Amino acid sequence: MFLLTRSRTMRQWMTRMVLSIASCAMLVAVSAPAQGQTSAGTSKSAKSAGKPSAKPAARKQTATAARKTQQASRSVRTQRAATGKTRRGARAQRVAYAPPKPSIGQLQGLRTDDPLDLHSSVALVTDQATGEVLFAKNDRAVLPIASITKLMTSLLVVEARQPMDEVLTISDQEIDTEKGTSSRLRIGAQLSRADAMHLALMNSENRAAHVLGRNYPGGLPAFVEAMNAKAALLGMTQTRFVDPTGLSPKNVSSARDLTLLMKAAYQHPELREYSTSPSYAVAVLGRPTQFGNTNRLVHNPDWQIGLQKTGYISEAGKCLVMQALVQGRRVLMVFLDSAGKYSRLGDAQRVRTWLESRQAAAVGTTS
């Protein structure tokens, strides 16, 4: 009996042991992959723990650089916007507080209507041969004449018979302190008296005109005195000069007086040639420099111009004196204080068209 009980107990114990072992085996089988993964991760961590990781630091540096770039970009955009606003504000301020200065003719109320619808306050058209007045508008008004002055300057130089090949030097005395205009005749440039007169007439070069007056016998004061003396000799009773360039608004005359000046200047071939040449080149400090004519009509083959001079300062408006052949007749034209960039040239064309139509009507009547 004792042996039977003992045998049953042993069997029960062995059964429990087998079940326990089987359970353990199943647990080992299930947990093995996770443990493998954990071991691998642990192994990698162990390996990487031996040396510092670069990726997090690189990512941090990249993010920091990106933030700085964005901040710099925003700063630049802000500065540009502020600069743009400042510039627009400055432009608006200039427009608002610097209106165009009215001319003397405009202030005197001379810009009135006329039969030819001219844009000039003053106009005078005469027959060069007979002196007959063909058209007149405020022809006795005394106004600034700007660079028309250079016609008198050149007339004096020619009549003084100074050597035309003498070399003149542009100095700081030629710098425009009246209007602050610029010039391509740089300080130290040298050119002949003939070239200086050519540029003064054709291109209205202020430094060229000034150096001509400065190199007159007795200097600039004597030259200005001679200008006024010549004007009086020609019968230009409404004319006064204070400088050889016309930059000063104190250089004044009338259309009647300027017609007398044109008649005198026309007698000299050099003045006719120089004033009407389309362009001319001179060496400025060793560099060939091209200058053009300020009167675009000299480039027009429909016009036959024998003498001309343009002028402009704000007090004088746009000015033009010109001798031209119209329908076989030599006519002298004077336009002072013209409003608009090309209006003086337009006025010359309007006068020419009027003269041609007038002559055509006269021919039709006689026939």
Image (cartoon, helix red, strand yellow):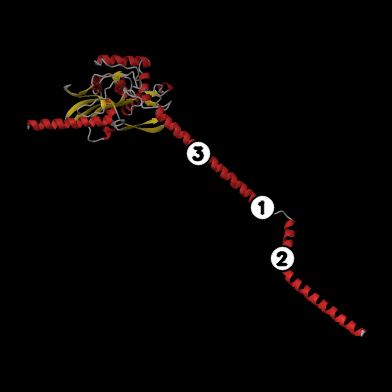
Residue in the foreground of this view, choosing between 275 and 251: 251
Q: Identify which residue is drawn at 40% across, 30% down.
A: 95
Percent across and percent down for residue 30 are 73, 71
**Relative horizontal placement of residue 326, taking residue 215 as reference (left or right):** left
Do callouts 2 and 3 mark residues in contact (Cβ within 8 Å)?
no
Label 1, on which residue? 56
Q: Disc 3 marks which residue?
A: 80
**Which of the marked residues, 2 or 3, is nearer the chain's N terminus?**
2
Q: Quadrant of the C terminus?
A: top left
Instruction: Decide if residue 15 is on the left or right side of residue 189.
Output: right
Q: Helix or strand or loop: what does disc 3 sit on?
A: helix
Of the residues shown, which amino acid type is indicated by label 3?
Arg
Which numbered disc, 2 or 3, marks the residue closer to the eye?
Answer: 2
Above or below residue 92? Residue 242 is above
Residue under the image location 11 percent in, 30 percent down: 362
CA gap, disc 1 and disc 3: 36 Å
The answer to whether 74 is drawn above or below residue 101 in the figure is: below
Give the percent coordinates (x, y) of residue 280: 33, 32
Give the mark, 2 or 1, whose residue is nearer the N terminus. 2
| Residue 235 lies in quadrant | top left
Q: What's the CA distance linking mark 2 and mark 3?
A: 58 Å
